[in-house]
Amino acid sequence: MPTVTIDGIKVEVEKNATILEAAQKAGVWIPTLCYHEAVSRSGACRLCMVELEGGDQKQLVTSCNYPVRHDLVVSTTSEQAVKARCGVMELLLARAPESEELKELAERMGVLQTSFPTVTESQRNCILCGLCIRVCEEVIGQSAIGFAGRGVDKAVAGPFRQPAEDCIGCGACAAICPVGTIRIRLHEEEQEIEISPFKSRNKLIVCEECGAMIISAQVSEQALRKIESIFAEFPHRLRLCPQCRKKQTAKKLEESKVFHKKVTVS
Ligand code: SF4
């Protein structure tokens, strides 16, 4: 197995593990934004840059997708690596100046402000890391959103920048967005869920017991298709909110205890 010496700490890793994984094993922190273990790695945000050492040649690489094929010596604290990461963070802060998540990470890196002008309103608050696109395609299997436009016009959007029709309103993109830009909005009167900024709207199903809105009808249908054959009760349980589901489970448990008592006595 190859070894990675990272900031002086030596660890062994599987061949083709990434430098980031080696750092995690060594307990060395490297900031990341576009990395998530659930999806493929892209190195898009460049925030995880480290310096490869060895011989005369030094090289900056993105640690989240750099495979370890042989022994490596890596520095996360070299002047070049720190300068590169802080420069990237300043650019990101200019793109998403209102993101509390980003400001928190910047502070941890020692970056307190940006020297770059903030981008225009229409481009604001998306850092174009593409995590939402990857989770939608690779985990949810919908490919409802993608990159549109180029250069300063580049954005994540539905096809032709229209409402994302293939969106099922699962909310995975909002959950994974590292800067909190993608939001789930509830339209109570219409009983619909909207994924902002993709302008997709989906009907919500309401709890059969208490009428609370739960999940999008399309997510429910997909789950049913997968699980119906295994649990006969699942279709009904999926139409209950978590609280009513809990109550129903407790009631059933109580009923089974009473039944058990009756059988034991007789
Ligand atoms: S909410 Fe829509 S766009 Fe977001 S991951 Fe789910 S299907 Fe894709």
Image (cartoon, rainbow, N blue to C red):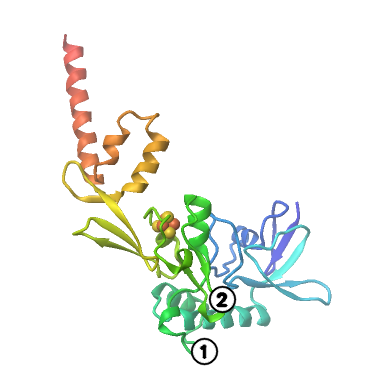
Crowding at mark 2 (Cα within 10 Å: few <14, some 14-19, many 20+): few
Q: Secondary structure at mark 2?
A: loop
Confirm whether residue 33 shows in the render: no
Q: How many marks do you count on the picture? A: 2
- At a point 57% along the width and 71% down the height, the residue shown is 45
- At a point 32% along the width and 34% down the height, the residue shown is 234
Asked whether 184 or 225 is in front, the reply is 225
Q: Secondary structure at mark 1?
A: loop
**Closer to the eye: label 2 or 1:** 2
Q: Position of residue 214 (x, y in %)?
A: 26, 50
Q: Quadrant of residue 242?
A: top left
- Quadrant for ligand 1 reads bottom left
Q: Position of residue 216 (x, y in %)?
A: 32, 51
In the rendered image, which residue does mark 1 sit on? 116
State which tag comes first along the sequence, 2 or 1. 1
Asked whether 70 or 184 is in front, the reply is 184
Dot 2 beta carbon under 8 Å from ligand 1: no
- Asked whether disc 2 touches disc 1, contact meaning CB atoms under 8 Å apart, the reply is no
Q: Position of residue 97 (x, y in %)?
A: 42, 81
The relative height of residue 10 versus residue 93 in the rendered view (above or below) is above
- The three-letter code of the residue at mark 2 reads Arg
Q: Is residue 25 left or right of residue 2?
A: left
Crowding at mark 1 (Cα within 10 Å: few <14, some 14-19, many 20+): few
In the rendered image, which residue does mark 2 sit on? 150
